[in-house]
Image (cartoon, grey):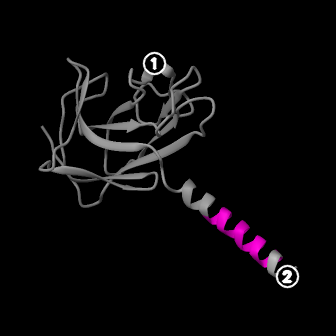
Amino acid sequence: MKKFKSLFLCGVALAVALTFSACGNPKETVTLGSYNSTSQTFTALGQNAEYSLEQNGYTLTLKGKIPYSESILGIDAGNIVAVRFVAPEGTEIDGEASVQTTNRQDASANGWNTYGEEAFEADGSLIWVTSVKKDADVQIKIKWNKDTAEVTYTLRVDTNAEMLTA
């Protein structure tokens, strides 16, 4: 009986450990790129780009030379980046899909902007175009559908990154 109890407790401990490790490892695919507002297309950065995105769980850190861009999609000119999120495999967008961000100028009183299913691309991905600053992290909350948990990503600029200007 003691062996069975010990084996059972080991199984429970393993299940709990796997659950906690899964919580810290996003299943979404995250890609840094550029966004062309005229053609409404996202292009992933190539290997020789001057800046990059490092991912540690739900924390995304920009490194290198962060480009300067003219105003795009209602975002004032400045250091603007585009990040593409792809839902976990098999996840479909539904009427309860939503996005909240902390960085847009038209933020509501609580500091969050909320967008519905219309924010997602036809293929179910989410392209997030945002301005960044060294002294202010920005956040994005994504809920893919009624059955998925909301996840919150934090985007920050590395202290050694160079913010390019016009």
Q: Looking at the rendering, which quadrant does residue 86 occupy?
A: top left
Report which residue position mark 2 lands on: 2
Are dots 2 and 1 in contact, CB under 8 Å?
no
> Which x, y percent locates residue 11?
71, 68
Boundaries of the magenta span: 5-17
Q: Is residue 140 above or below residue 161?
A: above
The extreme right residue here reads 1
Mark found first going from the N terminus, 2 or 1: 2
Report, in whole angstroms, how far the alpha carbon at label 2 lies from the one at label 1. 56 Å
Q: Is residue 91 left or right of residue 65?
A: right
- Secondary structure under the numbered disc 2 in the rendered image: helix
Q: Residue at x 55, y 29 (%)?
A: 109
Residue 14 counted in the magenta span: yes
Near mark 1 (Cα within 10 A), the count class, few <14, some 14-19 or many ≥20, is: few
Q: Which mark is residue 118?
A: 1
* Type of the residue with mark 1: Glu
**What secondary structure is the magenta-colored segment mainly?**
helix
